[in-house]
Image (cartoon, rainbow, N blue to C red):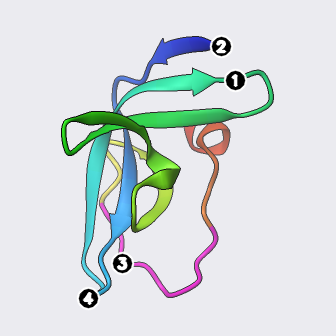
Amino acid sequence: MSLVAADGHVALFATPEGDSYNLPLVCWRDDGTSVHGLVLHRGTLRQAELVPGFRRYAHGSEAAPSFAAGEPQRRLAQAAG
């Protein structure tokens, strides 16, 4: 497993009320089969996909969009490119 700095990338989330917010990625984790972004959530480093409301990864300069219910989630590798 390797950890790579994720400067400038964020994980986008949506609340049940339809609001959106983002958390900066601390790093990426590559487990050999997939890549996951890690965020600091409630004082613990957690995989972004496991935090409630996760929608997708994005670059920090991208505005936080509104999300439609059931919108597919982009993988980190796609957002990084």
Residue ID for mark 4: 17
In the rendered image, residue 18, in percent from the top left (x then y), is placed at: 30, 85
In the rendered image, residue 9 lying in the magenta stretch gets the answer: no
Q: Earlier in the sequence, mark 2 or mark 4?
A: 2
Question: Is residue 81 visible in this depiction of the protein?
Answer: no
In the rendered image, residue 27, in percent from the top left (x then y), is placed at: 42, 23
Tell me, yes or no, whether the two marked residues, 2 and 4, touch with CB atoms within 8 Å: no
Mark 3 or 1, closer to the camera: 1
Which residues make up the magenta segment? 64-72
Tell me the crowding category of disc 4: few under 14, some 14 to 19, or many 20 or more residues within 10 angstroms, Cα based.
few
Is disc 2 placed on a helix, strand or loop?
loop
Indicate which disc residue 69 carries. none
Tell me, yes or no, whether the two marked residues, 1 and 2, touch with CB atoms within 8 Å: yes
Q: Residue at x 66, y 43 (%)?
A: 78
In the rendered image, residue 66 lying in the magenta stretch gets the answer: yes
Residue ID for mark 3: 66
Identify the amino acid type marked 3: Ser
Looking at the image, residue 50 sits to the left or right of residue 7; the answer is right
Indicate which disc residue 31 carries. 1
Identify the amino acid type marked 2: Met
Mark 3 or 2, closer to the camera: 2
Indicate which disc residue 1 carries. 2
Residue 77, compared with residue 7, is above or below; it is: below
Identify the amino acid type marked 4: Glu
Total count of labels? 4
